[in-house]
Amino acid sequence: MDAWVRELYKHSDYYKKAEPTIIINDLSGFEIAKNDKPVKFDEDAKTSKDLGTFKIGDKVDVGGHIITLSNAVYDDSKKEEYEVTAAKVLKVDFVYQNSTKEEQFIDGHQFEIYDADGTKQEVTSIDFFGENVQPGKNVSGSVHFGVTGKGPYEIFFADMATDTKAKWIIDIK
């Protein structure tokens, strides 16, 4: 944050070619931190952590989001009811546990899926799942993807706060 404030200052009308002193106060005015030295700000730094590739049934901690995917099946039963135009509907069950210290929101649109050709598939609105999860609590549900039928599929989940991501390979016969 300190580096970002300095960079913002240097592009403002107040910049006088001298490093600013950044002072952080709490709500009572008490000085928490003070820094008058420059901090390098690198927007292009690669800090993401790729956890690797997992299989259905593996329990994976993605930056405090503990996710288990299971029971991946083609389920075209609601395809006509919801007017899904994809060739098939892939249903994947999941269990999500919040091991962070803050309430987290989880929904199906946080997952990305690609077919064997590398084409991004769509999360469908069938049984849209979205839930706030308190720290230490878990929730389970299903997410549906409109897919081409060209498996195996790669499903990704990324935590934006820690820039951590995981990938599951799902091979449906």
Image (spheres, rainbow, N blue to C red):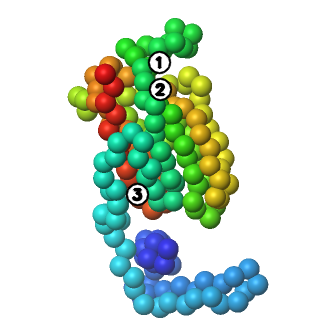
Amino acid found under the numbered disc labelled 3 = Thr
Which quarter of the figure is the C terminus placed in? top left
User: Nearer the N terminus, badge 2 or badge 3?
Assistant: 2
Quadrant in the rendering for residue 107: top right
Horizontally, residue 153 falls left or right of residue 26, namely left
- Pointer 2 residue: 91
Amino acid found under the numbered disc labelled 1 = Asp
Within-10-Å neighbours for mark 1: few <14, some 14–19, many 20+: some
Quadrant in the rendering for residue 26: bottom right
Q: Is residue 107 above or below residue 162?
A: above
Q: CA distance from mark 1 to mark 2?
A: 6 Å
Amino acid found under the numbered disc labelled 2 = Lys
152 and 3: which one is in front?
152
Q: Is residue 100 above or below residue 10?
A: above
- Pointer 1 residue: 75
Does the residue at mark 1 contact the one at mark 2 (Cβ under 8 Å)?
A: yes
- Pointer 3 residue: 164
Q: Position of residue 78 (x, y in %)?
A: 54, 14
